[in-house]
Amino acid sequence: MNNPLSVYRHLPRAIYVLSFATLVNSVANFVYPFLVLYLTTRLSYSAAQAGRFMTLTALLYVPFSLLGSVIADHFGRKRLMITTQLCMAVVCFLCGWIDGSPAIPVLILIALGIDGMCDPARTALKTDVTTPENRQASFSLVYLSMNLGYTVGPMIGGLLFSSHIRWLFWGNAIALAASTIPVALLVPESNPTAEEIRKSRQGNAADRAEEGSLFHALRTRPLLLLFAVGMTFFSFGYSQMSFALPLFFTDLFGSQGALQYGRIMAFNSVIVVVGNPLVISQAKRLPPLRNLAGAAVLFMLGFLPFIWTRRLWVLYLAALVFTVGEILWVNNERTFVANHTPISHRARFGAILPIIEGTGQALAPFAGGAIIDRLSMDWLWITSIISFFIGAMIILALSQKKWRESQ
């Protein structure tokens, strides 16, 4: 507690480079946080139409992510990451060039599909260059860098949305292109060698290599499959942050809704930046599964005020509470998965597990739009709280099972 930042000392050089690249991308990640507002205000989509579009983007993620995972496991994480980011930059530039066109949603789908290909490579690369001993701190630093960028990115995005909307896309394109340079120059290709995989199969580590296909390897990790189901309920609830919350603020503040949403997201990122090392230094005393159950409780408490109050200071207090839950969730979920994923299938596990967990994210905007249109915004927050509760029960059950097996 005297110096919580010391947890980030002596990490692999590749992690520092990846963290810097993440920072650059996060500062200029303007498109996705404002995508719902772009669809509803610029292209005149209804809430339900925007929800269906967001669900489509999540469904499109599945085949692209699986394809990218196979490429990353066999041909290289770094090469795929650089190629896909440059392709996304080109598509984002085109979106800015034809702003307001009905073709924009198609280009956005293409960009998000390419991003789906990139995600397994990013995850596997971070896991490859770390060890179980420094993995939580390493992932935490990347997460901290992302949120450091988000402390200013959403505010800039809110201003651009109001007056220079083309630069939502162009700024994103420039950042994607620029962030590939340090990765290309300073991060090595990280695929495990055949000898490393062979030696790993002879051991008993939680991340030991497995032979055969992805589905064979999955059968050897039933704990991870059940864990992913629990995370599905987390992702359903938390995805309302990107879908329902901007609509909620637009209802409250009208034309200033985008700006207020950007401010509260920036506040969320400031809390992550300030609180991340403090929370980690305390949370490491408990097993990851217990920390995740605690995260669910904080999410429920943080979402509760959206039902009964419209006072801005209370909403910021709620954001403080659910942000601490977010810190616990992200750091413990990623570390638990990485430590139990076979080194021979890291990219493929990095694709299939987010797909399982992403079921909640895919359903969230579709269900959310329907709930808002047919019932009310309040019922959407109630549904999210129930989802977190179910996820917490699953994680606690797994925690008890894992504890009994260790005795």
Image (cartoon, rainbow, N blue to C red):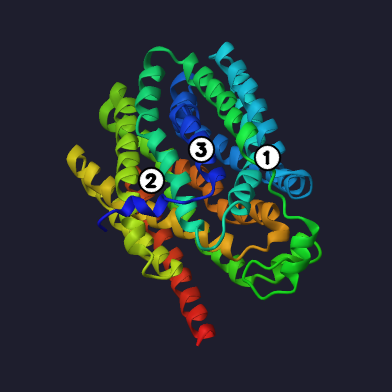
Inter-mark Cα distance, 2 to 3: 15 Å
The residue carrying mark 2 is: 375
Q: Nearer the viewer, residue 22 or 360?
A: 22
Residue type marked 3 = Gly
Mark toward the viewer: 1 or 2: 1
Residue type marked 1 = Lys
x, y percent for residue 370 = 47, 43
Residues tagged 2 and 3 counted as in contact (Cβ below 8 A): no
The residue carrying mark 1 is: 78
**Which image quadrant for residue 373?**
top left
The answer to whether residue 377 is left or right of residue 230 is: left
x, y percent for residue 217 = 73, 66
Residues tagged 1 and 3 counted as in contact (Cβ below 8 A): no
**In this picture, is 314 found above or below 290?**
above
Q: Nearer the viewer, residue 110 or 23?
A: 23
Estimate how packed mark 3 is, as few (under 14), some (14 to 19) or many (20 or more) residues with alpha carbons within 10 Å. Answer: many
Callout 1 secondary element: helix
Q: Earlier in the sequence, mark 1 or mark 3?
A: 3
Inter-mark Cα distance, 1 to 2: 46 Å
Residue type marked 2 = Leu
**In this picture, is 236 found above or below 180?**
below
User: Is there any visible trace of residue 48 in the rendered image?
Assistant: no
Q: What residue do we see at 63% from left, 24% from top?
A: 107
The answer to whether residue 77 is left or right of residue 369 is: right
Q: Nearer the viewer, residue 94 or 210?
A: 210
x, y percent for residue 57 = 60, 37
Q: What residue do we see at 52% from left, 34% from top?
A: 21
Disc ID at residue 51: 3
User: Is there any visible trace of residue 108 in the rendered image?
Assistant: yes
